[in-house]
Image (cartoon, coloured by chain):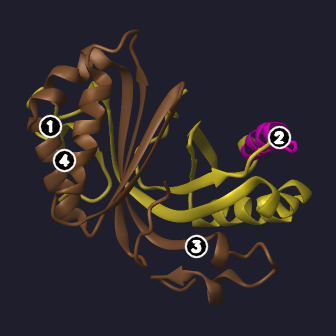
Chain colours: A yellow, B brown
Amino acid sequence: MLADTPDPPYVAVIFTSTRTEGDYGYETMAETMMELASKQPGFLGVESARDGVGITVSYWVDRASARAWKEVAEHSVAQRQGRKIWYSDYRVRIATVDRAYSMHSSTFDGQDATTTATTATPE
Amino acid sequence: MLADTPDPPYVAVIFTSTRTEGDYGYETMAETMMELASKQPGFLGVESARDGVGITVSYWVDRASARAWKEVAEHSVAQRQGRKIWYSDYRVRIATVDRAYSMHSSTFDGQDATTTATTATPE
């Protein structure tokens, strides 16, 4: 499901990973972490897919809430045990979303993005 | 494959989508677009997965190169024809990555992220 985030700016945590062979409780952990994330203060939404590479993008009101989630995740037993068991590699990128548009507010009809997109900092 | 991006800051274009039923040339278009992206000026890398939701995150040197890619993509026949044929919904988010770390430079060992992560703006 796609995340219905509010108008920018907000923060995206882009977590990309490759898995090791075998489950080792990974699926259960992943579901638990997703539930946990959605209960954190400042949570706006999450989008996730795995297909060779795994990509989970979680959205947060601000850096403080993204950072707080990071600490919760890192300190959870699941995450601390999982590093080498579950992942062969990963990247975490913290980013500020300052522009966003959806299928129904895009430039694909030839409209100008600067007038139809939700924009935090006009270009 | 995970993208080996340089130290932040750089720009991430987060494209998330849900598909319609049927291929309609989607796979071919997706591969072509990926090849096309990798040849654009300022391209740093891309990560992509589809599993119910599709997530493609492309990384760019700066906003100008991300914007140029967006225009190339939108003006390609594939992208213009594909909107309603291929996607039931999508979101595009443009974000500035200002912090990043990988499995081998993370805080999961109890180290302080501010000393081990590649950081554009120290917190």
Name which of mark 3 and mark 4 comes first in the sequence.
Answer: 4
Q: Secondary structure at mark 1?
A: helix
Name which of mark 3 and mark 1 comes first in the sequence.
Answer: 1
Residue range of the region highlighted in magenta in the rendering:
A24-37
Q: Which amino acid type is marked by label 2?
A: Thr
Q: Chain of mark 2?
A: A
Q: Secondary structure at mark 3?
A: strand
Q: Which residue is mark 3?
A: B101
Same-chain status of marks 3 and 1: yes
Measured from the top left, where is residue B18 in percent x and y?
44, 24
The residue at 22%/38% (across/down) is B32
Q: Quadrant of residue B116?
A: bottom right
Q: Secondary structure at mark 2?
A: helix
Q: Chain of mark 3?
A: B
Same-chain status of marks 2 and 1: no
Q: Is residue A7 magenta?
A: no
Q: Which residue is mark 4?
A: B36
Mark 3 and mark 4: span between their CA atoms? 27 Å
The residue at 79%/63% (across/down) is A84
Q: Which mark is residue B74?
A: 1
Frontmost residue, A87 versus A101: A87
Question: Is residue A113 shown to the viewer in this render?
Answer: yes
Mark 3 and mark 1: span between their CA atoms? 32 Å
Q: Which amino acid type is marked by label 4?
A: Leu
Q: Which residue is mark 2?
A: A32
Measured from the top left, where is residue A1 in percent x and y?
55, 26
Q: Which mark is residue B7?
A: none
